């Protein structure tokens, strides 16, 4: 009986539920079309985002480009790597060898040279390999390490440039406090703090999952479309904010230089030597070149983060590629600027190059002399044979 009631109840519930389902279906048909249209739009938008992400992130993605494009990019990067390594090694050895260059301010210069040297040793050669292979075939781990080191170098560079600007500002505008603020011990601590902040700034990339291979630039880099909010934060804290701080410092220095030259406040302001002004101009040029080389890429990233669907189709591929390789090129410029604008660096460059060349010539001459001695010196066997022949005659 209980079983019969249960089955009858179920049958009535089932038969009663059918008209409601049908009626509900009739009511839903009117709004179903709208929902389907919304779904289509949403799917189309997701497909666009997914396609752009695939283009940026697929390791197997290949680009069909004319051979001259890849050859040009490869030669450009080879030039950047060679000048980067040689130039920044010259900077480091110059500061190490020359007592005049061994000061608190140049500790930041050496730190900046190390940041520029990092990319030339590991990430750039991998980019060069992917250019000539037309794709990334070095595996996931190398991609992540390459992207991490590239980000470490970029953020380390801008943080060191900011540290140099603050150092120059304190040296020129607050000269009485400078020796206390920038003792050798404090300067080393500041550099360590810069690199600690650099590591803290780059670590979130590993968790956001934004380090991916981009076939357009043959590099494992920060993917700008991974997270709009994160990209905006990166551009602001890693580029715009440091640029604002550096601009403020150098603007105050320029005002003081103008005041000293016009003798507006000759009594309560320290005298600026020509050497101080040249050092300031040198570091100002380094800052301007960094800003010019990195601004296009950061502005593109900011625009893509704010309006991705509108901006991505408007950016030509050549502009995107040019902005990346222009940023890469910046790593080899600082050593050239020091050599052109700073007399102490220029002299030390010449000494190092001459010493290297003379050492090579010395080793070549010594090896040639040894070879000639071996050729001219008769062997004991030949000497004995000649003696035997003479005696027999």
Image (spheres, rainbow, N blue to C red):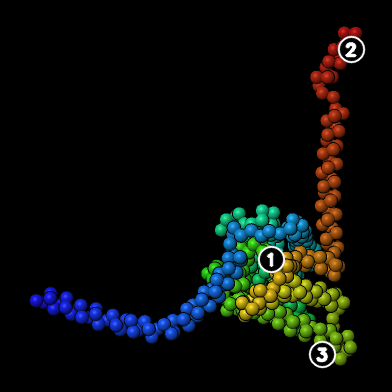
Q: Quadrant of the C terminus?
A: top right
Residue receiving disc 1: 115
Which residue is pictured at 86% across the width and 63% down the height?
347
Q: Which mark is residue 225?
A: none
Whether 276 is drawn above or below 380: the answer is below
Label 2, secondary structure: give it. Answer: helix
- Mark 2, Cα crowd under 10 Å, few <14 / some 14-19 / many 20+, is few
**First in sequence: mark 3 vs mark 2:** 3
Query: Residue 218's x, y, as percent?
Result: 66, 61
- From the viewer's perspective, is 236 left or right of 33? right
Q: Is residue 141 left or right of residue 30?
A: right
Look at mark 3 in the image and give the residue it sits on.
268
Q: CA distance from mark 3 to mark 2?
A: 97 Å
Q: Residue at x 64, y 78 (%)?
A: 310
What residue sits 67% from the left and 69% below the top? 154
Residue 300 coordinates in the image, percent (x, y): 68, 75
- Name the outermost residue toward the top: 392
Residue farthest toward the left in the current orientation of the protein: 1
Dot in front, 1 or 2: 1
- Element class at badge 1: helix
Distance from Cα at disc 1 to Cα at disc 2: 73 Å
The label shown at residue 390 is: 2
In primary-sequence order, the first of circles 1 and 2 is 1
Q: In the structure shown, which secondary structural element does the residue marked by tag 3 occupy? A: loop
Which of the image's four quarters has the N terminus? bottom left
Point 82% across, 76% down: residue: 281
């Amino acid at each position: 009986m209980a079983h019969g009631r249960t089955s009858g109840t179920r049958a009535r519930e089932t038969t009663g539920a059918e008209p409601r389902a049908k009626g509900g279906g009739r009511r839903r048909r009117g709004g179903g079309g709208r929902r389907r249209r919304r779904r289509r739009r949403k799917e189309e938008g997701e497909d666009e985002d997914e396609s752009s992400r695939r283009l940026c992130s697929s390791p197997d993605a290949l680009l069909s480009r004319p051979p001259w494009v890849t050859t040009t990019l490869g030669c450009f990067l080879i030039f950047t790597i060679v000048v980067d390594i040689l130039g920044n090694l010259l900077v480091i050895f110059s500061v190490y060898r020359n007592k005049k260059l061994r000061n608190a301010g140049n500790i930041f210069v050496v730190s900046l040279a190390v940041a520029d040297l990092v990319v030339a040793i590991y990430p750039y050669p991998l980019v060069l390999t992917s250019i000539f292979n037309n794709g990334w075939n070095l595996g996931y781990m190398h991609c992540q390490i390459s992207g991490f080191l590239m980000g470490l170098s970029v953020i380390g560079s801008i943080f060191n440039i900011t540290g140099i600007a603050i150092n120059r500002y304190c040296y020129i505008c607050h000269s009485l406090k400078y020796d206390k603020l920038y003792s050798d011990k404090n300067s080393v601590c500041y550099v360590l703090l810069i690199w600690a902040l650099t590591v803290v700034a780059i670590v979130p990339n590993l968790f956001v999952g934004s380090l991916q291979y981009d076939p357009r630039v043959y590099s494992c880099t920060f993917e700008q479309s991974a997270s709009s909010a994160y990209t905006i934060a990166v551009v602001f804290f890693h580029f715009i904010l440091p640029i604002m701080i550096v601009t403020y410092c150098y603007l105050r220095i320029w005002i003081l230089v103008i005041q000293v030259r016009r003798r507006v406040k000759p009594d309560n302001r320290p005298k600026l030597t020509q050497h101080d002004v040249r050092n300031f101009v040198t570091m100002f040029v380094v800052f301007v070149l960094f800003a010019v080389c990195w601004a296009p890429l950061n502005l593109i990233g900011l625009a893509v983060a704010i309006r991705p669907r509108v901006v991505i189709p408007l950016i030509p591929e050549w502009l995107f590629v040019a902005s990346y390789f222009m940023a890469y090129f910046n790593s080899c410029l600082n050593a050239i600027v020091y050599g052109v604008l700073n007399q102490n660096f220029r002299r030390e460059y010449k000494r190092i190059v001459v010493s290297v060349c003379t050492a090579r010539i010395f080793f070549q001459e010594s090896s040639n002399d040894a070879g000639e001695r071996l050729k001219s010196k008769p062997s004991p066997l030949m000497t004995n044979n000649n003696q035997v022949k003479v005696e027999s005659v």
